[in-house]
Image (cartoon, rainbow, N blue to C red):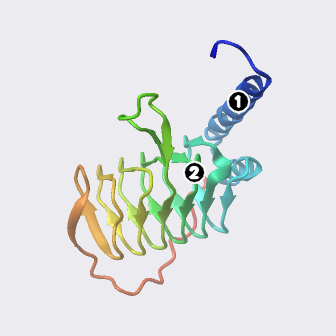
């Protein structure tokens, strides 16, 4: 079969991809607005679910925002990358520092066609993810866990566990066992 032929299905997929890319480019522009309430309006308009009191700080990047769900009272830092090509579920009271990258799609490096594979990412309540950490597809980070700065998480993180390194490995258990704190209001111009 000649792969160069443009079938109606391929044309439709190409048009849908261009529309999605254009929408993501507009969201990138919205990410430069210095008022989080305005950014949140555009993010919700794109299909992203954002809970009450949650904030995404400036300069965020998204892949398929309609696949992203953020709970209440969560703070997402500047320059994050959030991937919604599979489900990305972020719980309540999650604190995510600057430059965190969460991916739920990647290429299978052993596939002859280098096909994309996806895996849902779940970040449960009261998790802290340190600056410039990377979370890979298919990972669940359980309640109250901590990911140290610069860690690359490729396996699930247990409840209350502190992990760090490349690849992320357990460092210790978090001393706090009961979680009920609130992260508070977001800074207006971040």
Q: Residue at x 32, y 82 (%)?
A: 176
Q: Quadrant of residue 71?
A: bottom right
Instruction: Where is residue 180? Give x, y as percent.
Output: 48, 84
Instruction: Where is residue 23? Give x, y as percent.
Output: 71, 35
Q: Residues within 10 Å of mark 1 (few under 14, many from 20)?
A: few
Q: Is residue 170 above or below residue 10?
A: below
Label 2 sits on a secondary structure element that is: loop
Q: Residue at x 29, y 52 (%)?
A: 151
Res 90 label: none
Q: Residues within 10 Å of mark 2 (few under 14, many from 20)?
A: many
Q: Is residue 35 above or below residue 28?
A: below
Q: Residue lying farthest front?
A: 1
Q: Residue lying farthest left?
A: 171
Identify residue for label 1.
Answer: 22
The Cα–Cα distance between marks 1 and 2, rounded to whole angstroms, is 19 Å
**Horizontal side, residue 123 vs residue 43: left or right:** left
- Nearest-to-viewer mark from 1 and 2: 2
Q: Residue at x 65, y 41 (%)?
A: 33
Q: Residue at x 63, y 16 (%)?
A: 1
Instruction: Where is residue 66? Give x, y as percent.
Output: 68, 50
**Horizontal side, residue 126 vs residue 185: left or right:** left
**Horizontal side, residue 24 vs residue 45: left or right:** left
Q: Is residue 22 above or below residue 4?
A: below
Judging depth in this view, the residue of 76 and 36 nearest the camera is 76
Judging depth in this view, the residue of 173 and 180 nearest the camera is 173
Judging depth in this view, the residue of 156 and 177 nearest the camera is 156
Label 1 sits on a secondary structure element that is: helix
Res 86 label: 2
């Amino acid at each position: 079969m000649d792969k160069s032929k443009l079938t109606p299905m391929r044309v439709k997929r190409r048009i849908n991809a261009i529309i999605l890319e254009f929408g993501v480019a507009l969201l990138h522009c919205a990410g430069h607005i210095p008022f989080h309430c305005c950014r949140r309006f555009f993010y919700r308009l794109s299909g992203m679910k954002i809970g009450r009191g949650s904030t995404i700080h400036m300069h965020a990047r998204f892949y398929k925002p309609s696949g992203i769900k953020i709970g209440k009272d969560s703070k997402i830092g500047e320059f994050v990358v959030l991937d919604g090509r599979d489900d990305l579920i972020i719980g309540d009271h999650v604190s995510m520092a600057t430059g965190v990258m969460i991916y739920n799609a990647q290429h299978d490096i052993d596939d002859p066609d280098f096909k994309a594979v996806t895996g849902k990412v779940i970040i449960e309540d009261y998790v802290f993810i340190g600056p410039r950490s990377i979370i890979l597809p298919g990972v669940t980070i359980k309640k109250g866990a901590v990911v140290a700065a610069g860690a690359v998480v490729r396996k699930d993180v247990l409840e209350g566990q502190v992990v760090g390194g490349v690849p992320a490995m357990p460092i210790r258990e978090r001393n706090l066992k009961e979680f009920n704190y609130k992260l508070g209001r977001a800074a207006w111009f971040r």
